Amino acid sequence: MNYERLSDNSMSDWKAVRRIIARGRRFVVTTHLYPDGDAVGSSIALLRLLRAMGKSAGALLPSPVPAMYRFLRGESWLRTYRRTHEKLLSSADVIFILDSSTNDRLGALYETMQQIESTRICIDHHPNNSVSAELKVIDTRACSTAQMVYDLFHACGLKIDTHTAEALYTGIHTDTVSFNFLGTTARTHEIAADLLAKGVDAKRAWTKIYRNDTPGLLKLAGLVLSGLHTADRGRIAWTTVTRKQWQRLRVNPRDTESFTRYPLTLHKVGVIAFFCEEAERRVRVSLRALDKTDVGRIARAFGGGGHQTSSGVTMREPLSRAIAMIIRAIERGK
Ligand SMILES: [Mn+2]
């Protein structure tokens, strides 16, 4: 098998990135709010790449790394951005923006970045990327940003060590929903095989990422599932969690993000919506599509973002109104 080939990205894009890296001395890596496995994994891997090239590199994230990704070696390099980091950010020759499709998703960093001179490079796989950057490498066919960073390692002629492999594997595994969705191809499996050959322990990664549920969270999942709704003869399925429900079981509402996975096994289901009432008039909506419905477009229509198969939006509406608006949009978006 040949792992050197760059089937999706044009080599010239990576050459440009490599040239900018060679010229710079100080680098900062950042990614989106509420970072997922891909955001965390690709950030750690890119830091390792920059350091392997003898560069000074740090990472400033708009929000903290979730507990389930803290097993990754190098996680402690990812710091949560505060105003006191402004100097550090402005002294960077280059800022890498990973896995983020909009400026909004960069939180407070975006505001600061507008006022400084650093060159910004955006590496992402989301469609309709509107991030402000001097150089953008966008590959909507890539299953994850981690896969693109894997390509960059090859373009820079660098070896991938076990810790880097584990970070990249985590990004690919989580973004593809365990090698099932979002552009999972033969190449995705080839890369995974290469990362396993480099020493990734698949069972350890799965255990760390997925075996974190508390009894309270599973009890909440039970409540949520008994309130399952379907529409359009089973094509649409949705569940909700109210503020009262998560408060009573002392669950952090952020931890309910994984609840979208349960209705995926419903026979003939095409679109899944999950509504989490995080606060009064603040509803986090997660959408997943198994059919051709473009849930990315639906989320964008309400100010959110994402892919055709996976997207999200936070709505400033009462729960019942948010449900009505989104379900109507899904019904129309067949
Ligand atoms: Mn991603």
Image: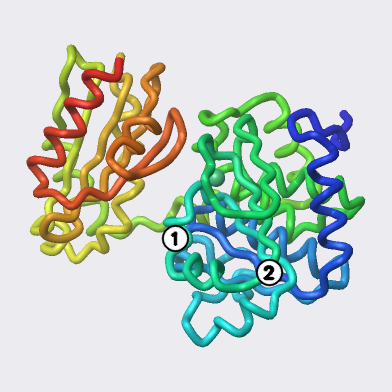
Q: Residue 231 location, x and y as percent?
A: 16, 20
Given residues 277 and 209, the one toward you in this image is 277
Residue 292 visible within the image: yes
User: How far separated are the C-alphas under marks 1 and 2?
Assistant: 21 Å
Please count the marks in the image.
Answer: 2
Which badge, 1 or 2, comes first in the chain's sequence?
1
- Of the numbered discs in the image, which one, if any, rests on residue 237? none
Image quadrant in which you'd find residue 172:
top right
Residue 174 visible within the image: no
Which residue is the site of mark 1? Answer: 33
Residue found at x 66% / y 65%: 95
Quadrant in which the N terminus is drawn: top right
**Does the residue tagged 1 have its C-beta within 8 Å of any atom of ligand 1?**
no
Q: Residue 324 location, x and y as percent?
A: 12, 33
> Horizontal placement of 304 versus 90: left or right?
left
Image quadrant in which you'd find residue 226:
top left
Image quadrant in which you'd find residue 49:
bottom right
Residue found at x 51% / y 87%: 84
| Circle 1 crowding by C-alpha within 10 Å: few under 14, some 14–19, many from 20 | some
> Horizontal placement of 132 versus 309: left or right?
right
Which residue is the site of mark 2? Answer: 118
